[in-house]
Image (tube, rainbow, N blue to C red):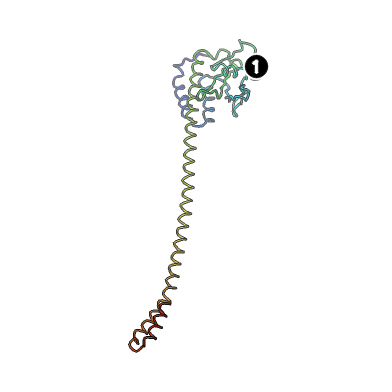
Amino acid sequence: AASLSLADRFDTLLTVGRTIATALTDDDIWLNVRRAAIELLRGEMSSVVLIETTADGDLKMVPMAGSDEAASEQLVMRAAQDGSVVRWTDEDGDPTESMLFNRTRCALAAPIYCRGTLVACWYVSHSGVSSLFGPDEFRIAEYISALASAALENAEGFAEVQALTHSLEQRVADRTIELEHANEELRRLDELKSEFVAMTSHELRSPLTSMLGFCRVALRAWDRIDDEKKREFMTTVER
């Protein structure tokens, strides 16, 4: 295959790099890393493998859905353990089972870190050329991994902001419901108060009206009433 210098791939580097850097979810980041491996490194097939640490401290590979092929576990583990870009060609010999199955002639694997922790490795291969991945490709692979690491940190921050926003929205919604219930209770209490005032006013007006009428009658005949009768009138009003 004709060699392409970094300068020849400069525009593609910028475009692909921007695509990885602006991805806001892990799935989008992995997809863009795989695309970058094909476009920038001219690979035929690419895959991303998540790396988990078991309770015993061993590294465990978890292949991502949608990958083009099963990555060579041996090469991926080398990249994970060395913490750097590694490659294999058919000139090195000792191909793995997946390499034989896919008729791989060259392959490259690179680790991806997030906040200093190994989280994944990506893998790219070609079945037709054995000398595809040289020093420039190593630098491009490091560039892809560095962008993916930064994008993963950004995605974590974005997810935290989304979670906080959702939490605040939920709290506002819950508080709104509480206020609506409180307002409804206040309206109910106001109606009860109005009913009580109306009922109390009616109950107070009835005896007062009777007392007022009684006093008017007594006043009109006051001069003709003897003292004993007056005392009876006053006793009645007091009761």
- Front one among 236 and 158: 236
Locate residue 228: give its quadrant: bottom left
Residue annotated with mark 1: 96
Give x and y (percent) for residue 200: 44, 70
Task: Report the residue at 54% width, 27% height from top.
Answer: 30
Furthest-bottom residue in view?
A: 224
Locate residue 222: give its quadrant: bottom left
Task: Report the residue at 49% width, 47% height from top.
Answer: 174
Furthest-top residue in view?
A: 91
Give x and y (percent) for residue 220: 34, 86
Disc 1, SS: loop
Give x and y (percent) for residue 186: 45, 58
At label 1, which amino acid type do we have?
Thr
Give x and y (percent) for residue 193: 44, 64
Task: Report the residue at 48% width, 28% height from top.
Answer: 153
- Front one among 27 and 13: 27
Q: Is residue 81 above or below residue 65?
A: above
Furthest-front residue in view?
A: 228
- Front one among 144 and 46: 144
Point out the image quarter for the C terminus: bottom left
Point out the image quarter for the N terminus: top right
- Front one among 137 and 76: 76
Q: Is residue 91 above or below residue 52?
A: above
Q: In this view, does 208 lie above or below 175?
A: below
